[in-house]
Amino acid sequence: MSDGGPSVHASAVKVGQIAVLIRGPSGSGKSRLAFDLIMAGRSGLLERAVLVGDDRVHLATVGNEIEVRPAPPLAGLIEIRGLGIRRCDFVEHATVGLVVDLDAQDAERLPAAESLKTSIFGVEIPRIPVSRDYSPLPLVVAALTTTKS
Protein backbone atom coordinates (compact mmCIF):
# COMPACT_ATOMS: atom_id res chain seq x y z
CA MET A 1 0.00 0.00 0.00
CA SER A 2 1.26 3.49 -0.73
CA ASP A 3 2.20 5.38 2.39
CA GLY A 4 -0.05 8.08 3.75
CA GLY A 5 -3.36 7.20 2.14
CA PRO A 6 -4.84 10.70 1.91
CA SER A 7 -8.19 11.48 3.47
CA VAL A 8 -10.87 12.65 1.04
CA HIS A 9 -14.35 14.07 1.53
CA ALA A 10 -16.39 11.10 0.27
CA SER A 11 -18.43 8.10 1.37
CA ALA A 12 -17.96 4.47 0.35
CA VAL A 13 -20.03 1.31 0.45
CA LYS A 14 -18.81 -2.21 -0.35
CA VAL A 15 -21.36 -3.85 -2.66
CA GLY A 16 -20.50 -7.46 -3.29
CA GLN A 17 -16.78 -7.50 -3.98
CA ILE A 18 -16.24 -3.84 -4.90
CA ALA A 19 -16.55 -0.49 -3.20
CA VAL A 20 -18.66 2.32 -4.60
CA LEU A 21 -16.85 5.59 -3.85
CA ILE A 22 -19.34 8.48 -3.60
CA ARG A 23 -17.97 11.99 -4.15
CA GLY A 24 -19.67 15.36 -4.28
CA PRO A 25 -19.99 18.72 -2.57
CA SER A 26 -21.33 19.07 0.93
CA GLY A 27 -25.09 18.49 1.00
CA SER A 28 -25.16 16.66 -2.35
CA GLY A 29 -26.44 13.38 -0.89
CA LYS A 30 -23.34 11.24 -0.34
CA SER A 31 -24.59 9.83 2.97
CA ARG A 32 -28.08 9.34 1.56
CA LEU A 33 -26.80 7.34 -1.39
CA ALA A 34 -24.55 5.30 0.92
CA PHE A 35 -27.52 4.37 3.11
CA ASP A 36 -29.72 3.73 0.05
CA LEU A 37 -27.11 1.26 -1.23
CA ILE A 38 -27.00 -0.50 2.15
CA MET A 39 -30.80 -0.77 2.11
CA ALA A 40 -30.77 -2.02 -1.51
CA GLY A 41 -28.39 -4.76 -0.39
CA ARG A 42 -30.65 -5.70 2.53
CA SER A 43 -33.71 -5.86 0.27
CA GLY A 44 -31.98 -8.11 -2.29
CA LEU A 45 -31.95 -5.50 -5.05
CA LEU A 46 -28.14 -5.62 -4.90
CA GLU A 47 -25.57 -7.98 -3.46
CA ARG A 48 -24.81 -7.50 0.23
CA ALA A 49 -23.85 -3.87 0.83
CA VAL A 50 -21.87 -2.69 3.86
CA LEU A 51 -20.59 0.74 4.81
CA VAL A 52 -16.88 1.37 4.42
CA GLY A 53 -16.97 4.99 5.54
CA ASP A 54 -19.11 8.10 5.52
CA ASP A 55 -18.02 11.71 5.09
CA ARG A 56 -14.25 11.06 5.12
CA VAL A 57 -12.37 8.06 3.80
CA HIS A 58 -8.74 7.23 3.10
CA LEU A 59 -7.58 6.15 -0.36
CA ALA A 60 -4.38 4.29 -1.17
CA THR A 61 -2.89 2.32 -4.03
CA VAL A 62 -2.51 -1.41 -3.54
CA GLY A 63 -0.79 -2.82 -6.59
CA ASN A 64 -2.85 -1.55 -9.52
CA GLU A 65 -6.02 -0.99 -7.47
CA ILE A 66 -7.37 1.73 -5.20
CA GLU A 67 -8.26 0.71 -1.67
CA VAL A 68 -10.66 2.72 0.48
CA ARG A 69 -10.72 2.67 4.30
CA PRO A 70 -12.85 4.53 6.82
CA ALA A 71 -11.36 7.50 8.66
CA PRO A 72 -10.71 5.96 12.11
CA PRO A 73 -12.73 8.47 14.18
CA LEU A 74 -15.75 7.96 11.88
CA ALA A 75 -15.56 4.17 11.43
CA GLY A 76 -19.02 2.63 11.69
CA LEU A 77 -20.81 5.99 11.73
CA ILE A 78 -23.20 7.32 9.10
CA GLU A 79 -25.30 10.46 8.95
CA ILE A 80 -29.01 9.85 8.42
CA ARG A 81 -30.73 13.16 7.69
CA GLY A 82 -33.51 13.64 10.21
CA LEU A 83 -32.01 11.14 12.69
CA GLY A 84 -28.44 12.39 13.06
CA ILE A 85 -25.30 10.28 13.34
CA ARG A 86 -26.04 6.56 13.62
CA ARG A 87 -23.87 3.49 14.15
CA CYS A 88 -23.93 0.63 11.63
CA ASP A 89 -21.89 -2.35 10.48
CA PHE A 90 -18.81 -1.51 8.42
CA VAL A 91 -15.82 -3.11 6.75
CA GLU A 92 -12.22 -2.05 7.33
CA HIS A 93 -11.30 -1.79 3.63
CA ALA A 94 -12.47 -2.51 0.09
CA THR A 95 -11.24 -2.11 -3.47
CA VAL A 96 -12.85 0.78 -5.34
CA GLY A 97 -14.63 -0.52 -8.45
CA LEU A 98 -17.00 2.37 -9.19
CA VAL A 99 -16.96 6.12 -8.55
CA VAL A 100 -20.18 8.14 -8.35
CA ASP A 101 -19.81 11.91 -8.71
CA LEU A 102 -22.88 13.73 -7.41
CA ASP A 103 -23.81 17.19 -8.74
CA ALA A 104 -21.49 16.49 -11.67
CA GLN A 105 -21.23 19.27 -14.24
CA ASP A 106 -20.63 16.75 -17.04
CA ALA A 107 -23.72 14.58 -16.36
CA GLU A 108 -25.57 13.89 -19.61
CA ARG A 109 -28.49 11.76 -20.77
CA LEU A 110 -26.13 9.90 -23.10
CA PRO A 111 -22.67 10.59 -21.66
CA ALA A 112 -19.48 10.54 -23.67
CA ALA A 113 -17.32 7.47 -23.05
CA GLU A 114 -14.54 9.56 -21.48
CA SER A 115 -16.90 10.89 -18.80
CA LEU A 116 -17.69 7.33 -17.70
CA LYS A 117 -14.23 6.77 -16.25
CA THR A 118 -11.95 8.57 -13.86
CA SER A 119 -8.37 8.19 -12.70
CA ILE A 120 -7.33 8.05 -9.05
CA PHE A 121 -3.56 7.89 -8.45
CA GLY A 122 -3.19 6.76 -12.07
CA VAL A 123 -5.70 3.90 -11.73
CA GLU A 124 -8.63 4.10 -14.16
CA ILE A 125 -12.02 3.33 -12.56
CA PRO A 126 -15.56 3.31 -14.01
CA ARG A 127 -17.47 6.49 -13.11
CA ILE A 128 -21.07 7.69 -13.04
CA PRO A 129 -21.61 11.45 -13.25
CA VAL A 130 -24.99 12.33 -11.72
CA SER A 131 -26.72 15.69 -12.14
CA ARG A 132 -28.21 17.50 -9.15
CA ASP A 133 -31.78 16.88 -10.30
CA TYR A 134 -31.48 13.10 -10.80
CA SER A 135 -31.71 10.28 -8.24
CA PRO A 136 -28.38 8.43 -8.21
CA LEU A 137 -29.61 5.08 -6.84
CA PRO A 138 -31.18 3.77 -10.09
CA LEU A 139 -28.01 4.65 -12.01
CA VAL A 140 -25.77 2.84 -9.53
CA VAL A 141 -28.06 -0.20 -9.43
CA ALA A 142 -28.08 -0.27 -13.24
CA ALA A 143 -24.29 0.03 -13.42
CA LEU A 144 -23.87 -2.83 -10.93
CA THR A 145 -26.48 -5.18 -12.39
CA THR A 146 -26.39 -4.68 -16.17
CA THR A 147 -23.80 -4.86 -18.91
CA LYS A 148 -23.06 -2.35 -21.64
CA SER A 149 -24.84 -3.09 -24.92
Image (tube, rainbow, N blue to C red):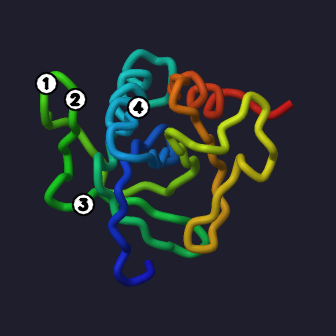
Indicate the amino acid at tag 4: Leu
Q: Earlier in the sequence, mark 1 or mark 3?
A: 3
Q: Which residue is mark 3?
A: 71
Q: Earlier in the sequence, mark 3 or mark 4?
A: 4
Q: CA distance from mark 1 to mark 4?
A: 15 Å
Helix, strand, or loop for circle 3?
A: loop
Please tell me which residue is depicted at 33% across the width and 58% down the height of the picture: 57
Q: Which mark is residue 83?
A: 1
Relative to 23, residue 70 above or below: below
Q: Are marks 4 and 2 in contact (CB under 8 Å)?
A: no
Q: Which mark is residue 80?
A: 2
Helix, strand, or loop for circle 2?
A: strand
Q: CA distance from mark 1 to mark 2?
A: 5 Å
Mark 4, residues whose alpha carbon is within 10 Å: few (<14), some, or many (≥20)? many
Mark 3, residues whose alpha carbon is within 10 Å: few (<14), some, or many (≥20)? many
Q: Which residue is mark 4?
A: 33
Q: Are marks 1 and 2 in contact (CB under 8 Å)?
A: yes
Q: Which mark is residue 3?
A: none
